[in-house]
Image (spheres, rainbow, N blue to C red):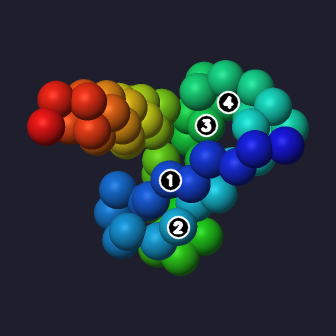
Amino acid sequence: MSKVSFKCPGCGHNLTVRSGVEIKSVDDIEGSACTNCGRTVHKDDITKQARDHAEKLVRDMFGKHFK
């Protein structure tokens, strides 16, 4: 299984989710708490991090092809 690493939006602590095992959709994350600071993690937090990561991958890919 692939692992997707996310950070707690409150304290920056690593939150690791195993894709397809515990979490089947971003909706499954709603209301979970950071084990470090206790902040409630919402699906919008994870969606933003995933979107930011995807944008970085695309920028990196285009950067390699358009030098």
Look at the picture and state if 60 lies above or below 9.
above
Give the Cα separation between the discs numbered 1 and 3. Answer: 11 Å
Front: mark 2 or 3: 2
Label 2 or label 1, whichever comes before in sequence order:
1
Q: Quadrant of the C terminus?
A: top left
Contact flag, marks 4 and 3 (Cβ < 8 Å)? yes
Picture layout, residue 32 above or below residue 42: below
Residue holding disc 1: 6
Gap between marks 4 and 3, in whole Å? Answer: 4 Å
Residue 16: quarter of image? bottom right
Residue 20: x and y in percent read 81, 31
Asked if disc 2 and disc 1 are in contact, CB closer than 8 Å, the reply is yes
Q: Which residue is mark 2?
A: 14
Q: Which mark is residue 28?
A: 4
- The alpha-carbon separation of the residues under discs 2 and 4 comes to 18 Å
Image marks 4 and 1: residues in contact by CB distance under 8 Å:
no
Mark 4, residues whose alpha carbon is within 10 Å: few (<14), some, or many (≥20)?
Answer: few
In the rendered view, does 47 fall on the left or right side of 30?
left
Question: Residue at horizontal 33%, vertical 63%?
Answer: 10
Kindly indicate the quadrant of the structure image that contains residue 59: top left
Q: Residue at x 60, y 70 (%)?
A: 35
Q: Residues within 10 Å of mark 3 (few under 14, many from 20)?
A: some
For discs 1 and 3, the disc positioned in front in the rendered view: 1
In the image, is 28 to the left or to the right of 8? right
Q: Earlier in the sequence, mark 1 or mark 3?
A: 1
Amino acid at dot 4: Asp
- In the image, residue 55 lies at what x, y percent? 28, 31
The number of discs equals 4
Q: Is residue 48 in sight in this rendering?
A: no
- Mark 4–mark 1 Cα distance, whole angstroms, equals 14 Å
